[in-house]
Image: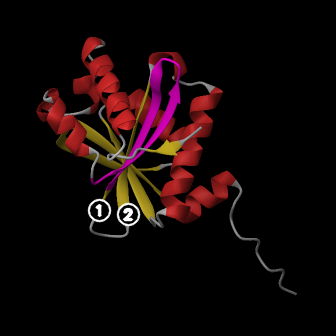
Amino acid sequence: MLRQYDPTNPQDEILLLQWWSLLVETNELHTVFDARYERVSEFLLAFRQDVLLLEVDERGIWGAFWFDRSPLAGAFFSLWLRKDHRQSKASLEAISLALGVGFHDLQFRAVLVVTSEPAIAALHQRYGFARLGVVPGLYFGQPAIVSYMTDDMFDQIAGTAPAQEATG
């Protein structure tokens, strides 16, 4: 069940410590975060301002979804899925729920997603994100593929768009 991380809850901090340890063990830390997050204290601090949503099972966090707020009416949306949940039906449902929180609960008008991997960018487009373009050097020195989704786009995809009034 998707839930929001509470930085004042010691159990949630333990979950984040376990997640950080897994990211280090699997050499995934640098695929998602920059070098400053090698320090666990920086990793924990990163989620005090951002909105972090978690999916957890008996092995710990299997899905993490976070919104890095923009000073505008949107946010960067990032996610990590444990290897055994990548491209699963449960992960797709969790992504949809997380985006729903961003658009409906947090009232973001648009979210941006960024990747350096063309295969991931293709998944973004399959999900309904529109590609903006490539920014040289943005993704840890590599070209970044930037895509976006608006709240209206999400509502159309999720089937939650307001019904159109019939004209006649």
First to last magenta residue range: 49-68
Q: Amino acid at mark 2?
A: Gly
Q: Amino acid at mark 1?
A: Ser
Q: Is residue 61 magenta?
A: yes
Side (left or right) of 155 relative to 68: right
Mark 2 residue element: strand
Tell which residue pokes out farthest to the top in this image. Answer: 25
| Residue nearer the viewer, 138 or 134 | 138
Side (left or right) of 58 relative to 9: right
Category of crowding for the residue at label 2, using alpha-carbon neighbours closer than 10 angstroms: few (below 14), some (14–19), many (at least 20)? many
Question: Where residue 28 sits in the image (x, y, percent)?
Answer: 29, 20
63 lies above or below 22: below
Mark 1 residue element: loop
Residue pictured at 31% horizontal, 13% vertical: 26
Q: Which residue is mark 2?
A: 74
Label for residue 70? 1
